[in-house]
Image (cartoon, rainbow, N blue to C red):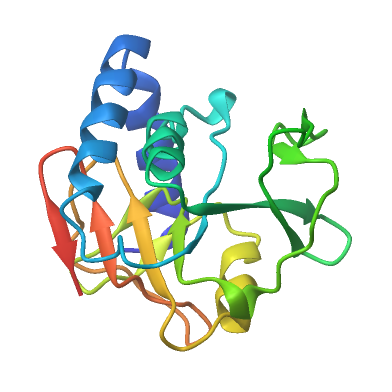
Amino acid sequence: MEKQHLRKKYKALRALLSEEQREEKSLAIANQTLQLPIWENSYFHLFLSMPNNKEVNTEYLLHILQGKDKSVVLSKSDFSTFEMDHFLLQEHTKIKISPYGIPEPQDGITIAPTMLDVVFVPLLAFDTSGHRVGYGKGFYDRFLAQCRPDCINIGLSFFEAEARILHENMDFPLHYCVTPEKIYRF
């Protein structure tokens, strides 16, 4: 299925979920991640949810990461280069909503993508082979290309997998995708 069609479809499906349903599903996704073989790692990259886009609420996952004393890394997007800078989340980190609606750290200790062990990836849809559909700007594909080959990429989705997504060679596949009901391994 084509990415443009999937973007439209999954934005509409997200919009149909009530706030209560999104929160329940987000908590279920966070709890599912506890079954993943990732917890011996140290550096975890996490996206902060954009409430206007009705994304998976990653606050539950953030609490799990902090409870396990993991180093959490957040990104700040540069829309002039379509690149991201990465900062270690600390007690005093100031988070501000960007003009694009993205909660982002304002500054802090810079972390190189090569230091990351696990990256939680935002998405709109994914398929049974681990290909995903994001918002179409390529931020995460550029970012994942900078990570180590052994870095684990994990998608988070309210919905189950599509059979097949048409993808390009520059698209980085996922290793896992977590839904409220299931963990997909690719």
Q: Is residue 180 left or right of residue 153?
A: left
Which x, y percent locates residue 58?
44, 36
- Work out whether residue 158 or residue 149 is closer to the camera in this orientation and state it: 149
Q: Residue at x 64, y 74 (%)?
A: 113
Q: Is residue 41 left or right of residue 114?
A: left
Q: Quadrant of the N terminus?
A: bottom left
- Work out whether residue 144 or residue 33 is closer to the camera in this orientation and state it: 33
Q: Residue at x 77, y 33 (%)?
A: 92
- Work out whether residue 164 or residue 20 is closer to the camera in this orientation and state it: 20
- Residue furthest front as drawn: 69
Q: Residue at x 69, y 34 (%)?
A: 91
Which x, y percent locates residue 11?
43, 35
Q: Residue at x 79, y 32 (%)?
A: 94
Q: Is residue 62 left or right of residue 82?
A: left
- Work out whether residue 30 or residue 77 is closer to the camera in this orientation and state it: 30
Q: Quadrant of the C terminus?
A: bottom left
Which x, y percent locates residue 164?
23, 69
Which x, y percent locates residue 167?
41, 76
Reply above or below: 153 against 16: below
